[in-house]
Image (tube, grey):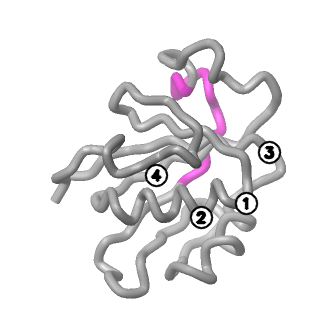
Amino acid sequence: MSATLLIVVLDPSVGLGELRDLLEDEFVVSGDSVSLTISDPDEVQAALFLVPVTDFVAEGVFEDWPTAMIPQKSASVFSFDYVDPRLMVKVVQAISGRFDSIVDTNYGVVLSAKALTREHLPENLQ
């Protein structure tokens, strides 16, 4: 079983290429212009799959968000599928260290990406 997390990068110029460049120093990153696979170099089997979200309305990205958290300007939105919450937090922390970001855990929590911890994510997905 996997879970999905959305990350909203508050910079519309950020795409998969920028995320790849940022993450490949710390993680194993592969993919193309459509999606990325990100894994921990020590645990390659625990991979994340990242794809950009282009139609915010059709995907219902902001429909359950608190109004105060919805970006007022253009942003880049990415969807992560993951099975390892520990790795998910590490990747989000790496992204939020460089880009202002907001995450939606899909478990009723929308918060600053810098504030994401394992406690915000489900424990056993495997």
The label shown at residue 94 is 2
For the residues labelled 2 and 3, the Cα–Cα distance comes to: 16 Å
What amino acid is labelled 1 in the image? Arg
| 10 Å crowding of disc 2: few (<14), some (14-19), many (20+) | some
The secondary element bearing badge 3 is classed as loop
The earlier-in-sequence mark between 1 and 3 is 3
Query: Does residue 52 show up magenta in the picture?
Result: yes
| 10 Å crowding of disc 3: few (<14), some (14-19), many (20+) | some
Residue position marked by numbered label 1 in the rendering: 98
Where is residue 101 drawn, in percent x and y? 66, 44
Residue position marked by numbered label 4 in the rendering: 80
For the residues labelled 1 and 2, the Cα–Cα distance comes to: 7 Å
Comparing 88 with 118, the one in front is 118
The secondary element bearing badge 1 is classed as helix
The earlier-in-sequence mark between 2 and 3 is 3
Is disc 1 in contact with disc 2, using a CB cutoff of under 8 Å? yes
Instruction: Determine the residue positioned at 25% across, 44% down.
Output: 122
For the residues labelled 2 and 4, the Cα–Cα distance comes to: 14 Å
Residue position marked by numbered label 3 in the rendering: 11
What amino acid is labelled 2 in the image? Ala
| 10 Å crowding of disc 4: few (<14), some (14-19), many (20+) | many
Q: Is residue 102 above or below residue 99?
A: above
Observer-side mark, 4 or 1, equals 1
For the residues labelled 4 and 1, the Cα–Cα distance comes to: 18 Å
Instruction: Determine the residue positioned at 41% across, 78% down.
Output: 40
Is disc 4 in contact with disc 1, using a CB cutoff of under 8 Å? no
Tell me where the magenta segment starts and ends, as one range: 51-61
Observer-side mark, 1 or 3, equals 1
Lateral position of residue 67 relative to residue 15, left or right: left
Is disc 2 in contact with disc 4, using a CB cutoff of under 8 Å? no
